[in-house]
Amino acid sequence: MANQVHIGRVSLTSPSQLGFEGSGGNRTLNISGKLAETNLETAKYIRDELVSMAQSGYYVPFEYDGDSSFNGFVEVSSSNIDISRYSIGGINYSVDMKYLGKVGEVVKESVITGKLLDNDHGITSTTQQFHTPPANHYNYYHTSNPESNVRVAADLTTTNTQDSVNLYFKTSQNLRTENAQFHVNTSDFYKGAVKITTNNLTRNGLNSPNNPGNSVIENGIMRIVIGNQPTQSRFTTYIWDQSAYQSDYEYSIHRGTPTSGQQLSTEFRGWNTIQVLRNLPELGIIRLTSNYEADGQGRLTVDISLRRGAHHASVIINQSPAVSRLNLGLSSATAMTSSTGYLKKTSLDVDGNKVIFGSPSTFSSDTTRGLIYPSAAGTQFKAFVGYEFYNQDGTLSTHNESDNVRDQYLDNVSEYCRVIKG
C-alpha cells in the first residue's frame, strides 16, 4: 500500500492530516486519518499496539512513505483509534508523538551496566562482555575499542523479509566501564532486533493477549517458540543459518526424579499465562506461568530473556512451593558431554551445530538423557540455553565457542539504548 506511515513496527494508512510543531525546544508530530483495513481484527491490532506504545515510553523509528523528510525517531505520547462502527469505513485514528529528531540530529547511546553473575564454577573475569548494535550502524564509539566479530541474523524488519544481515558482535573485558554511541538509519533500526510475537502478531510494547501457546521471542539468530500442549511445559529453540532457522531442540521443565528408563519426570500442566516484561530491540523478556496440581496449585514461573546478537537466552525458573527438585532438559534423550558450567551435545547435529545449556550454580546432570537440575531442591534455578554455532564450512569462530557463549551469559551486560542529542 503506497504512502503508508510506519510507527515502530506498525503501519497505518497515509494520514489525511499531519501537524508538525515546535515550542520551547521540543517538537511534536500529530497525524490523523482513517484506516483503510479490510479486516476488523487488523484494525483492532493497530489500535492495541498504538496504545501499548503510548504506555511504554519507548522510542521508535517514524517513516512516512509520502514525505521522507519527516523520517526520524519519536515517542508515542497518546493515540486513539475510534471504531465508531464495527464495520469497515468507520475507523478513525489519531496519534500524537514527541519528535526526537532526524537520524543526523540524534545519537543512539547504549547505557551499559551489569556485573559478572555469581557462579560456582570459579569464573571471576572474562573478555566476553558484549553488546550488538543494529545491522548497518555507523559512527560507532566506545573507549575500550571492543573486538568486533560477525554474527549472521535474519532481517527482522517491519516486512520481515528474512534476508540475512551481518551484525557486529562487540566484546571486551571492560565494556561496562563506559557507554557506547552510534548512528543508525530508521530503515535499519530493527535489523537484528529482538522481536516478540503472540497470536502471530508482533508486539510493540508491553501489552499482549494472554495466549502463550506458539508465542515467539527471537533476535534473528535464536528463535524460541513456546509450546502449546496443555500437559507440557516446553519451549523449542532454533538458530539461524544464512537462509533458515534450524537445529531445533525442545526443552521441558519438570519436577521430581525420573524413574529408570524414563526421560521425563512430572511435567507442569502447560503454559497458562504470558506477560511481556521488556520489549526493546536490544532486549526482550517474557514471563510464562504454569501449575502442577489439577486444582491449580503449585506455581511455576519462567522468565526467558534474549539479547540482540546473542547465541543464548537466559532462563530463570521459580516454583512455589519447593516440593521437589526442578529439572531443565531436552524432551528427547540426547547424549551430552559435561563441561564447566554447562552440557554440550556430544556430536554435531544434522545441521552441523551443538546445543548447549547450563547454570551459574552448582548442578547435577544426566548426560544420557540431557538434563540438569539443582544439587539441592529449592525454589529457583537459573540457567541458559544456546548453541555452539559452526560456520557453513564446518569451522568454529572463537566468539562462537561454547566456553565463550557461557562467558557471554555469565559476564552479564545490562544494556538500555537511548536517544541523545548529537
Image: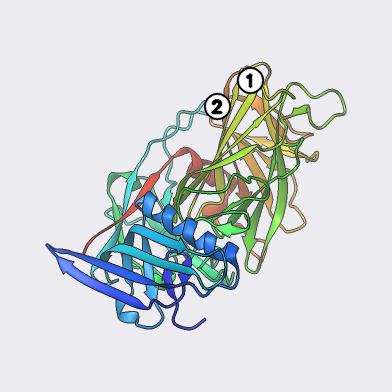
Discs 1, 2 touching: Cβ within 8 Å: yes
Residue 52's x, y, as percent? 44, 53
Give me the disc on residue 327.
none
Q: What amino acid is labelled 2 in the image?
A: Ser
Q: Quadrant of residue 251?
A: top right
Which residue occupies 38% across, 83% down?
66
Q: Earlier in the sequence, mark 1 or mark 2?
A: 2
Circle 2: element type: loop
Q: What amino acid is labelled 1 in the image?
A: Ser
Task: Determine which residue is flagged by label 2.
Answer: 361
Circle 1: element type: loop
Q: Give how far apart the Cα atoms at labels 1 and 2 are.
A: 9 Å
Residue 91's x, y, as percent? 48, 68
Q: Residues within 10 Å of mark 2 (few under 14, many from 20)?
A: some
Q: From what the image shows, is residue 19 above or below residue 342?
A: below
Is 89 in front, or is 226? 89
Task: Determine which residue is flagged by label 1.
Answer: 375
